[in-house]
Amino acid sequence: MQLLEQYIRLCTGYPHNKYGSPVDISLAEVAEILCCTLRNATLTLKKMQAKGWLTWQPGRGRGNRSVLVCAIRPADLVLSIAKEAVHQGEIRASRDLISQYEAGIPQLAEDYARWMSSHFGIHAASETGRVDILRLFVDRPFDGLDPIHVLLRSQTHIVKHVFDTLVRFDPLTKRIEPHLVYDWETDSSRCEWTFYLRKGVLFHNGSKLRADDVCYTLNRLKKEASSHRWMMQTVETVEALGEHVVRIRLNRPNELFLDLLSKEYMSIVSRDFMERASGSLVQMPVGTGAFRLVRNDDSMLALEAFEPYFRGRPFIDRIEFWCVPAIQAEEKQMVMPVTEEDSRLMERDSSWKSVVRMEECFQYISFNAAKEGPLRNDAFRREIASLIDPQKLCEDLQGSREGLGSWGFGFAFEHQPEDSKDVAIAAQWRDSSYESEVLKLYTYPDIDHIEDAEWIKERCASYGIAVEIVYAVPEELARPEVMQQADMVLDSANVDEREEASLLELCFANTLSITHHIKPSDKAHVTQLIAQLQQETSVQERKQKVKGIIRELIEHQVFVPLYHNRVDMLAHPRLAHVHLDAYGWIDFSRLIFRH
């Protein structure tokens, strides 16, 4: 980009109304502007002329001045080069170029964002036949896609489309169904499970799925330092009985075992690929899923339909996720933005479909009762929990925040008038051991987390409690030592229709704060309650036990659930089967483009 920088420098003193018109100038003056020799100035001008940026007519004879015509305004040239980089798939280089010059060129960032927005949504290519492309944007690259190490819901969503699990959960019927297996059976003790794999299932590299791959996958999760290793707590052994039969023995009955097997963290990987490819699974994994990964870097992630998919090829041919941090989704990553053209279409066409769903996931704040300090005091935790009023937070910040409804949270949030609440908090304050220590609140630097954290900080300050906000990227905040040193953590819990399995993840996942912040004595008690939950055969009884465990955690001020997010999106009239799951994502394998 040195040539571009030199052109912009050359244009700095160029009259704005003279672009495209000749200006008299000497070669020596050009060399002075470019801070180079006469020879290099001549070479540079020739390069710029070859690109069509300018025309240069050297003066002939002593005393005759040369003529320079700058054909393109710097703003137009920068935007043009950025556009060309996008067309070549170099999204990162394109946005870096805009970032480099946006401060000195008014409107550049806005013009670029407007142009970029027009490239998202539904597109069709026809080089060798029609190719239906869905193009979306994300604000960060997909750095890790190993199923046993994924941290973010966005990563989990990609894993869901690239990999498959042995069984799957149907959110409509709330039943576990066969997926990579035809069927399964268990003995009378409920400790021995036998699974019969489908024959002919292919990985994206062409190898066939075998029982050995299943054994390798589950044993890998059991042995490696994964934050999801807790899912294998009740698994004693995994063994292959031939090429298509797997036997799993549990050390105790676990009625939630099939629910856990349906989680994306249990996605089956190819043993051969893993042993040969080593760390490449993180960026370019090979699964059996409906889509295969063809590109994953800091510019974009691209998925293509897997033709021999055992459940039938998806309708969409290609999905691209462009990494464009400058263009923020107002409500949710991976939700298609509405362009100006779409807006005009909506004014004329009422066939656009509004799709709204309340996420099952919820925002929460946890209190570190396991760390030495004021939060180890029960009365002080009660005080903090009392003043962080979820209803008031939602009313003050609004946006897509909605009151809590699932898992029986409602019982904990009966409305209390502010004056009576002040009296209650003051009474608790007298019993607490707070001595003006600064409490560190850790969270992510995302807009909703920032707003929530600032609200909590101000709320605490109004009661004389000092809070310092510490922002950390997901990979940093997921480290156990960071969780343990934090006084409070503001995070989001992964919850879907598998309520019991979601509760286990909240309590046991090493990347979430609950397991690090709960008192050891309380943790032992909750672990005992969860063991009882896992052995309960009655669905209704399990639901009651889930509510009881949540109530126990809240009443011990381990955490305060804050709110759900509401996801609002408009579905293009040409898109059919648009449904949002419990995480607020779209199932791309079900989408159809109407021509």
Image (cartoon, grey):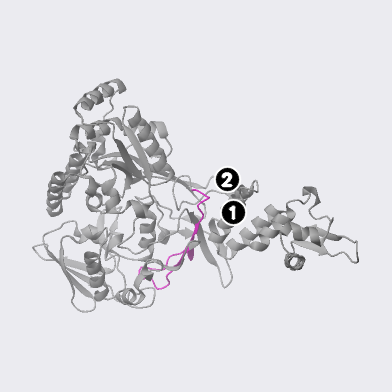
Query: Does residue 477 lie above or below 35 as drawn?
Result: above
Magenta range is 301-328
Q: State the residue in front, 54 or 416.
A: 54
Disc 1: which residue: 100
Instruction: Say if mark 1 contacts mark 2, CB within 8 Å.
Output: no
Disc 2: which residue: 343
Residue 199 position in % (x across, y down): 29, 76
Q: Nearer the viewer, mark 1 or mark 2?
A: 1
Q: Quadrant of residue 457?
A: top left
Q: State the residue in front, 435 or 581.
A: 435
Residue 523 position in % (x across, y down): 16, 47
- Relative to residue 501, is residue 120 drawn left or right? right
Q: Residue at x 59, y 54 (%)?
A: 100
Q: Quadrant of residue 205?
A: bottom left
Q: Earlier in the sequence, mark 1 or mark 2?
A: 1
Residue extending farthest left: 189
